[in-house]
Image: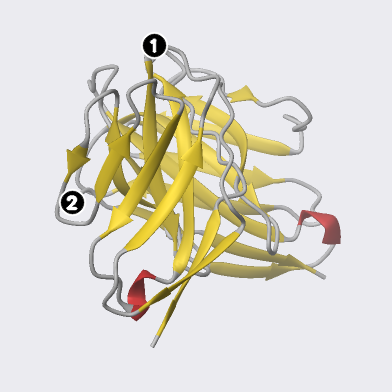
Amino acid sequence: GAVVSQHPSWVICKSGTSVKIECRSLDFQATTMFWYRQFPKQSLMLMATSNEGSKATYEQGVEKDKFLINHASLTLSTLTVTSAHPEDSSFYICSARVYGTGLSSHEQYFGPGTRLTVT
Amino acid sequence: DAKTTQPPSMDCAEGRAANLPCNHSTISGNEYVYWYRQIHSQGPQYIIHGLKNNETNEMASLIITEDRKSSTLILPHATLRDTAVYYCIVRYGGATNKLIFGTGTLLAVQP
């Protein structure tokens, strides 16, 4: 099956610093990538939808200036958490849709997640 | 997106069938039912999806009622490795194609 990787798998940073998380589709091209956040014992919350070569679309309540998303190619999207604070500590998961899939396709794959801890 | 309702938790004995219910009473005609699962501290894994007909693959079976207002995911022979949170998601096959996760069901397979 298709594989989505994330790097790093975990990161610890100091409050006020910025952290970049990479999401790569390893063996397929992804037209659209999604970024989710998950707090302990909670469900995944969609943060933004990212299309290759265009600006990301953020969900209501998600600060676009704090969570910078870049989708520069069909295999790479990055999420940068700027000026991170302890409340940004969370599990960040990306997901990628296969390029060219139709409306009924299930072809959306998830990365293993990145655990961010801000001290 | 239509919302789904799932029980928060269920237990199942190893080797027995696990039947996970989901209510989606406001589903519209062009919305699909998807099931994903998330094992602790990992990314979600696709299980199965369907529109109207029952579906089966190597992992599970999906039974959708005739009125499409509810569905059941069946794991025919549950193993300890099937312990996970199972999410039932209704998704419109439109341009956004967003998967919006609800609270899911924590399935605990007991030895």
Q: Quadrant of the C terminus of chain B?
A: bottom left
Of helix, strand and loop, which one carries label 2?
loop
Q: Badge 1 sits on which subunit?
A: B
Q: In the image, what residue occupies the spot 51% across and 42% down?
A: A78
Residue A107: x and y, percent? 27, 35
Q: Residue at x 57, y 69 (%)?
A: A10
Q: Is residue A69 above or below residue B1?
A: below
Measured Cα–Cα span from mark 1 to mark 2 = 29 Å
The tag on residue B29 is 1
- Residue highlighted by disc 2: A1
Where residue B96 appears, x then y in whole percent? 47, 18
Residue B21 position within the rendered picture, expressed as x and y whole percent measured from the top left: 45, 47
**Element carrying mark 1:** loop
Q: Is residue A31 above or below residue B20?
A: above
Is residue A3 visible in the rendered image? The answer is: yes
Residue A43 appears left or right of A16: left
Q: Amino acid at mark 2?
A: Gly
Above or below for B31 versus A75: above
Q: Which quadrant is home to the N terminus of chain B?
A: top right
Q: Position of residue A52 (x, y in %)?
A: 41, 24
In the depicted structure, whether residue B11 falls above or below residue B49: below
